[in-house]
Amino acid sequence: MKKTRNNTLIKYACLFLFGFLCSLINTYSVFAQAKTKTITGIVTEESNLPLIGASVSVKGTSVGTITDLDGKYSINVQENATLLFSYIGCISQTVIVKDKTVVNVTLREDAQALDEVVVVGYGVQKRSHLTGSISKVDINGLEDIPLSRVDQALQGRIAGVQIQNTTSEVGEAPVIRVRGMGSISASDSPLIITDGFPVEGGLEIINPNDIESIEVLKDAASSAIYGSRVANGVIMVTTKSGEIKKPKYSVKAGWGIKDTYKLHPIMTSQEYVQMRVNESVLMDIPLPAQDFLFLVLITILIGKKKVYAQLKYTMPTSLFPVVQTK
């Protein structure tokens, strides 16, 4: 009887201890929830522009969110939590919350991270896998070179890009080929993209001073986003955009002398007729007697008597022979 009573007391004691522990856990949970607060803020880049889609997470946990179109975010964290801010191409940054309720962060550009990956079409690839497929022109090295056309900035500076001037006419666009000819009969000109929009007129309509960067896509994977028009490559031109800074005026001037490489002398009408006469004398070829225009030129510019004397011809009585009719 006594042994049974002791067992009953032990059972009640265990139940009491279990209930007490459960109440402690519940109290701790409620206390922890009471210490949770909402943190808001804006994530921007170095130029004070908002970063869309930047990652904001609690370090060491799976709690996180992303910024909206204005770079704003809102997240519930516990006190003394550490927020981790990250974005593609930027250096990650951590901030300890403590007693803060608003945390604004400016992320700096990570040049090394940008050099490791390249945005290709709808995805991302390592630059080491695209060696030779994407070429970029160093615009900073062209500032001291007088350029009147954009194609001059590409000539001889990118491997696989050929620029040929097929005519000497002023303002005539050169022929641009990326990795040789792509077709015998169809067009083999590359697709030109300016600020994300195709340009039909070519590079000659773009002011060289307005260019921020020039990239040439020579691989099918790197240019797949533009469809079938990129069979002959893509030339991507990014122009300069405005910045939120103080007004700045810049003037660029230059001068030069351009002359014809070899100027061919042009004959007058009289010199041309005399050349034809001399040619006929030397080659013993009769003059085109039936050429009305030539006979008129002989009559007006040189004279029939002089020409026929040189050719030892019998001068006709008229330029137009009379046809006898019955």
Image: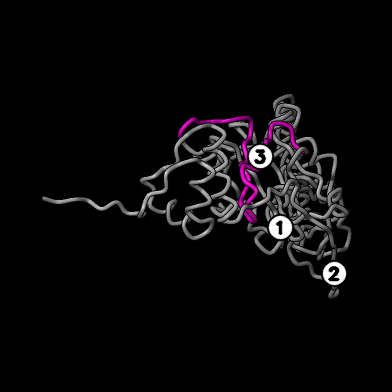
User: 150 above or below 19?
Assistant: below
Mark 3: few/some/many CA within 10 Å (<14, 14-19, 20+):
few
First in sequence, mark 1 or 3: give its number.
3
Of the residues shown, which amino acid type is indicated by label 3?
A: Gln
Q: Nearer the viewer, mark 3 or mark 2?
A: 3
* Majority secondary structure of magenta residues: loop
Judged by depth in the image, the label closer to the viewer, 1 or 3, is 3
Does the segment drawn in magenta span residue 94?
no
Ranked by sequence position, the earlier of labels 3 and 2 is: 3
Quarter of the image where one finds residue 245: bottom right
Which residue type does callout 2 highlight? Val
- Looking at the picture, tell me which residue is in the foreground, 223 or 278: 278
Residue 165, image x, y percentages: 65, 43
Is 197 displayed left or right of 151 in the figure?
Answer: left
Helix, strand or loop at mark 2 = loop
> Residue at 78% across / 38% down in the picture?
157
Choose between 243 and 278: the one closer to the eye: 278
- Give the residue number, with chain letter if any, for mark 3: 164
Q: Residue at x 70, y 26 (%)?
A: 4
Does label 1 or label 2 sit earlier along the sequence? 1
Tag 1 residue: 239
Q: Residue at x 51, y 48 (%)?
A: 307
Amino acid type at mark 1: Thr
Q: Separation of disc 1 and disc 3 at Cα? A: 25 Å
State which mark lies toward you, 1 or 2: 2
Q: Identify the image quadrant of the N terminus.
A: top right
Q: Give the magenta-colored segment's residue range.
A: 157-185
Give the number of the disc on residue 251: 2
Residue at 63%, 30% in the rendered image: 179
Q: Nearer the viewer, residue 120 or 171?
A: 171
- Residue 101 image offset from top left, x and y in percent: 81, 65
